């Protein structure tokens, strides 16, 4: 079989022959073409080959007896006589002779004629059914004459040759006439013998073999030894006697057994008889000569008399080379006058025949593969295994009286933070409708795609009999910070000391004295606005890490972070200033972190220094120094004169020895982010403090919502390091963003783990920023409604480091009131760029730069777009400017100044003027154009009215003193009655400030 394209040209180049597994002997294979149509308009032309079976003498008893439909042997019809002439020997030829080719051509022409006759007969059969049946019965009675019933003659052996009639062999095949189905009469009537010339000529002993094409799933020429046949009832042919005989044998094992189908008449579904091919010819059905349908016109031959030879009947052929499972041969034992559909009903009792009697088959006359291969009437479509199982299940449920609910299987259902109803149903192996019904019974109306929380999902799963395992997206954080170190692996590490105190008390100067550097001169305004980390190497080789924290109130978050990562807190207090608010805040941060405090009383070289006052003030905050019997160490130092520094270092080392500070350097590093900034040349730079392990170049670090591979490690002096041991502050380069100060950092095993952590943290941050906070009370709801009336000042903040930007944002949030507030559009670290200018233009906000500058492109764009950029180096100035702007946005206060009261005596209606009140001034003075308030029976009926006209007698005056009478007219108010009280006052506006 070969595949061809739609254009009729063979897809194989060079005109190749169809694919076959055996050599193609001359005349051994005949072919036809079939055009198949598929879905989507695709067609394919298929070449169907029919291979002629080669009969061989089988070993005795090896082959099973073939059925009558698979082997039919023609026997020559003879005049009625007492004996039958013996057969002539027939040799099995492998090739086609000239006689075989002629017989094949006659068979094709006969099949064509039969097809045309059958169609013509079916067209006129509906109108002439009764008349045709009567005419056929009479013709059958006149033409048939029952011959004598001699005993059946034994079959001649193949070796014995019987003389054949030369006239019968040479007689040409007459044109067959349509033969109606014979109807047996109620009483047997004598029939005339059929002339011998009507029988088709055949060679003596010639058999007929039908060769079948293999099914499409078997594309080789090997014979199938395993044949599937549906199981038939065991008692189906118990009473049948027709055709129960052994197959014809071509050996000399004895005579042929007698036939026992003497009374059988011709059946309508027998194969049409026609001209028999001479020799060992093979009848093949092709596209030009398809297999006739059952009930079609029969060829020459007719019923035979009882006991006589079967006229025009076929003996069973040899065992076919390809045995097919779908082909069902006609079985004996069926009635002669049975309708064609009865065969189908008896063969498949469960299959309904919907076609009416005499109606043409819808698929008759179509050229299909089954028709060409000779399998159109016997092919059956097999039911799928799933269909059979469903049918059995329906029958079982029907016998039980209806479907029964299956027992639920308890499962472990994994429930995340949020889950849809459909997903929950899938995890419970339950229909979504059942879950929705349960929720409806609980008063919750949800759809299949709605999201429920984990508590509701747990309730549903428990109600359905399942166990629940709750998981959270936060589980991704597990294992980020490694387990605690084992004591055997711990080694001593340097102490981390945080220097805290009030602003201008000398914290940075003290560190400069310890480090022999001058950092104060580089600070703007002489104050520290960043958190700095330094490591000091002592004379004996020991190291101490210092953290310098800002003392300004705006940097409270920085001081808190410094206290959390430190081991020891040095509280710096100026001897001439005493304990200040930020000193108290630093004490609170140190206590919250659980860090021991060492008090450094600075500036003792000043004339007005009073260390005793400082010690007494600390007692109010529960700080008791050793001189008073406490545990807190106090050291008097002078940073400028470098006095008492050795005592301070000695106390620090003593306290570190008491704390027994150790860490494991042989593990992956983790620690805290102290500060982060965005450098133009180096990108994101984070200052971190390693707490455990060793940080190396090339490690993959996750810090907050940023991650990256460490490209460089720098110490406070700008020197590159290969690794950083515990308690070492370093700057790392290579992060994809600036992490928030105070975030923990750790080294992870690979980039996939780093992406997983950062994506989860970024998603949580977005959800927190976008999720509205639910109102907890009526007051909160009213405050939320009042927020819509709040005047906002949008600003964009860019600072040099992330901590400074965070401090500015916190300070501006503290300036907010119920009427005005600053709305932060963007805050971050880095220089001002063009994107910031475009964002500011869209939001109508100024840009505040803290220790940063705008690029030239950003400045030009800001000038063109009219965006204001302000630069600041000291945080005081920035906060004062924003406070002034917010104060100007406050609504002014309206202040009333009392002038006097008047009483309405009588009201008049004057043309072109309106209603006028005749009044007497009872107190103070009444002035024209002043504000008035009218009170009637202690109820204010006019608020903030305007005195439009004031007359005394007929003259207009500007004011009227107490005790005098006057006439008054008010702007836009006419409802004046006698007895009303008029209050007169002035209204002035007073500006407010924060």
Image: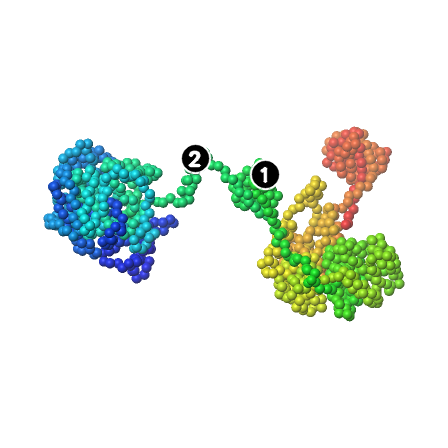
Indicate which disc residue 399 carries: 2
Disc 2 residue crowd, few under 14, some 14–19, many 20+, Cα 10 Å: few
Residue 540 sits in quarter? bottom right
Indicate which disc residue 296 carries: none
In the image, is residue 47 above or below residue 980?
A: below
What residue is drawn where x is 14% and y is 47%?
86
Comparing 405 with 975, the one in front is 405
Measured in 3D between alpha carbons, the distance from the residue under mark 1 to the one under mark 2, in whole angstroms, is 39 Å
Indicate which disc residue 444 carries: 1
Left or right: where does residue 923 sit relative to residue 273?
right
Q: Is residue 333 visible?
A: yes
- Depth-wise, is mark 1 or mark 2 nearer the camera? 2
Which SS class for mark 1? loop
The earlier-in-sequence mark between 1 and 2 is 2
Residue 303 sits in quarter? top left
Quadrant where the image shows the N terminus: bottom left
In the image, is residue 576 above or below residue 963?
A: below
Left or right: where does residue 721 sit relative to residue 656?
left
What residue is drawn where x is 23% and y is 39%?
241
Left or right: where does residue 874 sit relative to residue 753?
right
Q: Position of residue 840 (x, y in %)?
A: 65, 55
Comparing 66 with 99, the one in front is 66
Q: Is residue 203 visible?
A: no
Q: Position of residue 562 (x, y in %)?
A: 74, 58
Q: Position of residue 591 (x, y in %)?
A: 77, 54
């Amino acid at each position: 079989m070969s595949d061809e394209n739609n254009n009729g040209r063979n897809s194989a180049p060079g005109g190749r022959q169809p694919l076959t597994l055996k050599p193609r002997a001359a005349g051994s294979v005949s072919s036809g073409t079939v055009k198949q149509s598929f879905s989507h308009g695709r067609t394919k032309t298929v070449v169907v080959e029919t291979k002629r079976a080669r009969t061989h003498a089988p070993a005795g008893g090896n082959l099973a007896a073939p059925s009558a439909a698979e082997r039919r042997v023609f026997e020559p019809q003879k005049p009625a006589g007492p004996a039958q002439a013996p057969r002539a020997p027939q040799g099995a030829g492998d090739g086609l002779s000239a006689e075989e080719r002629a017989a094949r051509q006659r068979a094709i022409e006969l099949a064509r004629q039969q097809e045309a006759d059958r169609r013509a007969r079916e067209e006129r059969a509906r109108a002439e059914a009764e008349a045709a049946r009567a005419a056929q019965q009479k013709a059958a009675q006149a033409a048939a004459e029952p011959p004598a019933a001699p005993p059946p003659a034994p079959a001649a052996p193949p070796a014995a040759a019987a003389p054949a009639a030369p006239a019968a062999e040479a007689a040409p095949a007459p044109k067959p006439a349509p033969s109606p189905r014979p109807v047996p009469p109620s009483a047997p009537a004598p029939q005339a013998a059929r002339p011998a010339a009507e029988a088709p000529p055949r060679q003596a002993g010639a058999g007929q073999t039908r060769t079948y094409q293999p099914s499409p799933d078997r594309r080789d020429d090997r014979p199938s030894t395993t044949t599937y046949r549906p199981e038939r009832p065991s008692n189906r042919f118990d009473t049948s006697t027709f055709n129960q005989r052994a197959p014809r044998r071509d050996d000399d094992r004895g005579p042929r057994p007698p036939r026992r189908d003497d009374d059988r008449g011709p059946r309508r579904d027998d194969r049409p008889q026609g001209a028999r091919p001479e020799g060992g010819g093979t009848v093949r059905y092709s596209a030009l000569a398809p297999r006739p349908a059952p009930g079609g016109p029969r060829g020459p031959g007719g019923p035979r008399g009882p006991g006589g030879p079967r006229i025009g009947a076929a003996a069973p052929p040899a065992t076919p080379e390809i045995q097919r499972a779908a082909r069902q041969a006609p079985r004996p034992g069926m009635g002669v006058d049975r309708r064609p559909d009865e065969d189908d009903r008896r063969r498949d009792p469960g299959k309904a025949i919907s076609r009416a009697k005499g109606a043409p088959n819808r698929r008759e006359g179509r050229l299909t593969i089954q028709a060409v291969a000779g399998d159109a009437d016997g092919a059956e479509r097999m039911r799928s295994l799933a269909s059979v199982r469903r049918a059995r299940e329906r029958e079982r449920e029907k016998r039980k009286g209806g479907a029964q609910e299956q027992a639920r299987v308890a499962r472990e259902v994994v429930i995340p933070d949020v889950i849809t109803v459909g997903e929950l149903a899938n995890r419970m192996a339950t229909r979504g409708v059942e879950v929705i019904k349960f929720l409806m019974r609980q008063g919750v109306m949800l759809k299949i795609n709605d999201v429920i929380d984990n508590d509701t999902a747990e309730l549903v799963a428990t109600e359905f009999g399942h166990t629940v395992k709750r998981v959270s997206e936060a589980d991704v954080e597990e294992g980020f910070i490694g387990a605690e170190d084992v004591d055997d692996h711990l080694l001593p590490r340097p102490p981390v000391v945080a220097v805290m105190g009030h602003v201008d008390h000398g914290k940075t100067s003290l560190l400069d004295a310890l480090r022999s550097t001058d950092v104060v001169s580089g600070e703007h305004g002489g104050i520290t606005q960043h958190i700095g980390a330094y490591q000091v190497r002592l004379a004996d080789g020991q190291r101490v890490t210092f953290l310098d924290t800002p003392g300004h109130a705006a940097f409270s978050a920085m001081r808190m972070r410094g206290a959390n990562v430190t081991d020891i807190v040095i509280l710096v207090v100026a001897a001439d200033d005493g304990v200040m608010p930020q000193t108290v805040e630093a004490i609170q941060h140190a206590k919250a972190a659980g860090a021991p405090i060492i008090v450094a009383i600075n500036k003792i070289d000043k004339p007005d220094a009073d260390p005793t006052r400082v010690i007494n003030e600390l007692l109010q905050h529960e700080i008791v120094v050793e001189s008073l019997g406490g545990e807190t160490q106090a050291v008097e130092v002078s940073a400028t004169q470098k006095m008492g520094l050795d005592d301070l270092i000695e106390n620090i080392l003593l306290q570190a020895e008491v704390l027994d500070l150790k860490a494991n350097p042989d593990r992956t590093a983790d620690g805290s982010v102290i500060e982060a900034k965005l450098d133009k040349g180096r990108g994101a730079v984070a200052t971190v403090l390693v707490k455990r392990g060793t940080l190396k170049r090339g490690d993959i670090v996750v810090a907050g919502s940023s991650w990256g591979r460490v490209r460089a490690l720098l110490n406070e002096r700008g020197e590159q390091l290969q690794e950083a041991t515990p308690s070492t502050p370093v700057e790392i380069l290579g992060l994809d963003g600036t992490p928030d100060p105070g975030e923990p950092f750790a080294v992870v095993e690979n980039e996939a783990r780093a992406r997983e952590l950062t994506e989860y943290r970024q998603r949580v941050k977005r959800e927190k920023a976008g999720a509205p906070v639910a109102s907890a009370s009526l007051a909160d709801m009213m405050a939320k409604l009042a927020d819509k009336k709040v005047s906002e000042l949008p600003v964009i903040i860019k600072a040099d480091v992330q901590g400074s930007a965070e401090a500015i944002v916190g300070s501006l949030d503290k300036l907010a009131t119920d009427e005005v507030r600053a709305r932060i559009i963007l805050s971050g670290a880095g220089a001002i760029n063009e994107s910031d200018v475009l964002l500011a233009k869209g939001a109508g906000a100024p840009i505040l730069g803290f220790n940063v500058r705008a690029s030239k492109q950003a400045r030009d764009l800001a000038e063109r777009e009219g965006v204001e950029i302000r630069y600041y180096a000291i945080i005081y100035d920035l906060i004062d400017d924003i406070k002034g702007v917010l104060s100007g946005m406050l609504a002014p206060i309206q202040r009333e100044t009392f002038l006097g009261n008047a009483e309405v005596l009588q009201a008049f209606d004057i043309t072109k003027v309106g209603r006028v009140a005749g009044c007497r001034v009872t107190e103070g003075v009444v002035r024209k154009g002043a504000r008035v308030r009218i009170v009637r029976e202690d109820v204010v009926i006019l608020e903030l009215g305007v005195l439009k006209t004031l007359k005394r007698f007929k003259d207009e005056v500007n004011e009227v003193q107490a005790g005098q009478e006057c006439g008054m007219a008010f702007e836009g108010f006419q409802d004046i009655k006698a007895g009303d009280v008029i209050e007169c006052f002035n209204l002035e506006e007073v500006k407010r400030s924060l």
